[in-house]
Amino acid sequence: MLEALWNNVDYIASVVLFCIGLYIIIAKNNLIKKFLGLNIMETAVFSFIIALGVIDGGDAPIMGAGAQAPFSSPVPQALVLTGIVVAVSTTALALSLIIRIYRQCGTIEADELREME
Amino acid sequence: MKKAFVAALLIVTAIPLLIGVVALPPHGDPDTPVHTHISARYLEEGREEAGADNIVTGVLLNYRGLDTAGEVTVIFTALMAGLAVLISHKKQPEGDATYDAAEAAAEDAPVRAPVSPVVSFVVRLLAPFIALFAVYVIVNGHVTPGGGFQGGAILGALFIALTIVLGRERTRTLMPRLAQPWMQGAALLTFVGVGIVGGALTGHFLGYPAQASLHLARELMMLVLEAGIGLGGAAVFATLFLQMEAE
């Protein structure tokens, strides 16, 4: 059990990061902090997917002179690149919405917003 | 009460995740399904088939080109949604006679925080080098690590730094009003354009000619896509920043 844990310590780091992000989303009141938490969760997922594609002693999947097998898997890296861009887009949209909420309500604390209704 | 609830929820989330992670094959093992299925083929044939030394770029722009086109659409949609959310406020409030054009212009007038001379000097000094690096990253995306998204992010960051140091009036000339919509949609437009060219050559949207003699054509298509993604990405970041900074 412990050995399995130690072998997969990279994945466990992702799980820890994921839980930190989840904690921030639930526990923090400020909307911007909540979205920072969401970004941390996204980072956890990305690092997990990247870690899946790593190979022991592997090189970057770039061919050409001096390229030496084994190579890390290129598919997770391409998927994560897509994911990062989508994460940036959602963050930009979320921040725009938060700016709008602040203008309309004068606060971005979740509990104060709830009281306003 | 709330703290106990949060702790319980975190534990309930973490335990199944940890159990699942421990059951995975050891990290870095070359015999896991990630490495033995599709990646193996991409690594073996990708260089000739996709026309890019960097297999990640090959996967991104050739094998999964449609995926990337969808992703570019996501960025563009996010930009449009962000602008819609931010701009709609600026409409003239009804029945408010005191709100006239001059006042609106005064509201738009930049309120600049003072910038330290050190920051200002360093940004001015480094700007051309950062721009050169961004172009290098974009153009070499199919040979070295990098590509349109990364280079676009560098260009966008450069634009933001310059806006902070020089003020928005001066950096705005980098994005002329007439060219602005074309720059924001550049990534999507190049994907449609290259897709149609690929369609004319191969019969499939975003298809790449497969003959070995057309290696240069494949490389050129990728280069155009990378340039479009880079320019479009930078324009999206810049527009969102300008819009948010206008508050």
Image: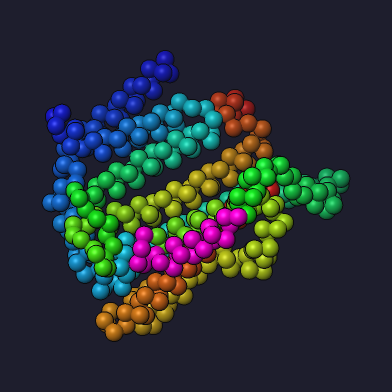
Question: Residue B71's spot in the image, x, y percent?
Answer: 42, 58
Q: Quadrant of the C terminus of chain B?
A: top right
Write the residue at 19% across / 43% down: B27
In the rendered view, tell whether residue B136 sits above or below residue A114. Answer: below
Write the residue at 21% across / 37% down: A8
Question: Residue B102's spot in the image, x, y percent?
Answer: 85, 52
Write the residue at 44% across / 68% down: B139
Left or right of B6 in this view: A100: right
Residues A9 and A94: in front is: A9
Examine the rendering and report whether any part of residue B77 can be seen. no
Q: Residue lying at the far right in this picture: please name it.
A: B98
* Quadrant housing residue B144: bottom left
Q: Assess whether residue B219 is covered by the magenta stretch.
A: no
Where does the magenta region start and end? B125-145
Residues A32 and B27: in front is: B27
Give the main secondary structure, helix, strand or loop, of the magenta stretch: helix
In the rendered view, tell whether residue B204 sits above or below residue B138. Answer: below
In the rendered view, tell whether residue B22 sits above or below residue A52. Answer: above
Residues A65 and A77: in front is: A65
In the rendered view, tell whether residue A30 sits above or below residue B243. Answer: above
Left or right of B109 in this view: B29: left
Write the residue at 59% across / 26% down: A112
